[in-house]
């Protein structure tokens, strides 16, 4: 089934100049870019995006991290795009990420783990329109 999913190349990976290499990983996994932009979230915007985690102890640190520098936000499309992206990203903790995955190659640690990806169709349904109105997707 063809799906759309959201990915964010986080500030740590942007700072490392890894954007092109990460996009190549997405494309090599058979994902097509339907929309893409670079922006710099405020702490408030990052907090709104990650509102699902508001009760978790890492919420404030996550919002602060996601607003510390530019990010690249992408809508990716393809067969089973959500599962395909999750596999391509690797485990949240880069110590557990399989070799060749984005997090194994580019993540610093569990908090600064290079990329975000929607974890379900429901998440993608919330996350994509947070960043992209329909007119911006191709």
Image (spheres, rainbow, N blue to C red):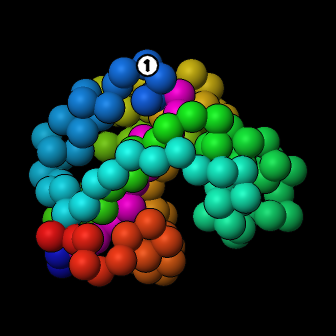
Could you tell whether 63 is left or right of 123 in the image? right
Q: Which residue is mark 1?
A: 16
Percent coordinates x, y for residue 81 in the rendering = 26, 63
Which image quadrant: the N terminus?
Answer: bottom left
- Of the pair 98 and 32, the residue shown nearer to us: 32
Task: Kindly report the secondary structure that dominates the magenta region of the rendered protein.
Answer: strand
Is residue 30 placed above or below 90 in the rendered structure? below
- Residue drawn at (36%, 77%) of the image: 133
Q: Position of residue 61 (x, y in %)?
A: 78, 42
Crowd rating for badge 1 (residues with CA inside 10 Å; few <14, some 14–19, many 20+):
few
Residue nearest the observer in this picture, 89 or 97: 89
Q: Is residue 90 left or right of residue 11?
A: left
The quadrant holding residue 27 is: top left
Q: Is residue 96 visible?
A: no
Residue at 73%, 58% (x, y): give it.
Answer: 44
Residue 18 counted in the magenta span: no
- Position of residue 77 relative to residue 9, above or below, is below
Q: Is residue 73 visible?
A: yes
- At a point 64% along the width and 43% down the height, the residue shown is 67
Indicate the secondary structure of the residue bearing disc 1: loop
Classify residue 28 by image quadrant: top left
Q: Estimate the x, y position of residue 123 in percent, counting from the top left.
A: 50, 73
Q: Magenta region: which residues?
A: 3-12
Q: Residue at x 43, y 76 (%)?
A: 129
Q: Position of residue 107 (x, y in %)?
A: 50, 26
Instruction: Please state if 89 lies on the left or on the right of 136 as rendered.
Output: right
Camera-side residue of 123 and 79: 123
Quarter placement of the C terminus? bottom left
């Amino acid at each position: 089934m063809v799906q759309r999913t959201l990915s964010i190349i986080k500030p740590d990976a942007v700072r490392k100049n890894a954007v092109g290499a990460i996009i190549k990983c997405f494309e090599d996994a058979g994902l097509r870019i339907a929309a893409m932009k670079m922006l710099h979230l405020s702490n408030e915007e990052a907090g709104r995006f990650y509102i699902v985690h508001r009760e978790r102890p890492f919420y404030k640190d996550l919002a602060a991290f996601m607003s510390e520098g530019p990010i690249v936000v992408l809508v990716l499309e393809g067969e089973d795009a959500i599962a395909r992206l999750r596999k391509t990203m690797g485990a949240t903790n880069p110590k557990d990420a399989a070799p060749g995955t984005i997090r194994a190659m580019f993540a610093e640690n569990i908090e600064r783990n290079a990329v975000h990806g929607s974890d379900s169709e429901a998440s993608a349904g919330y996350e994509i329109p947070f960043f992209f109105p329909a007119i911006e997707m191709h």
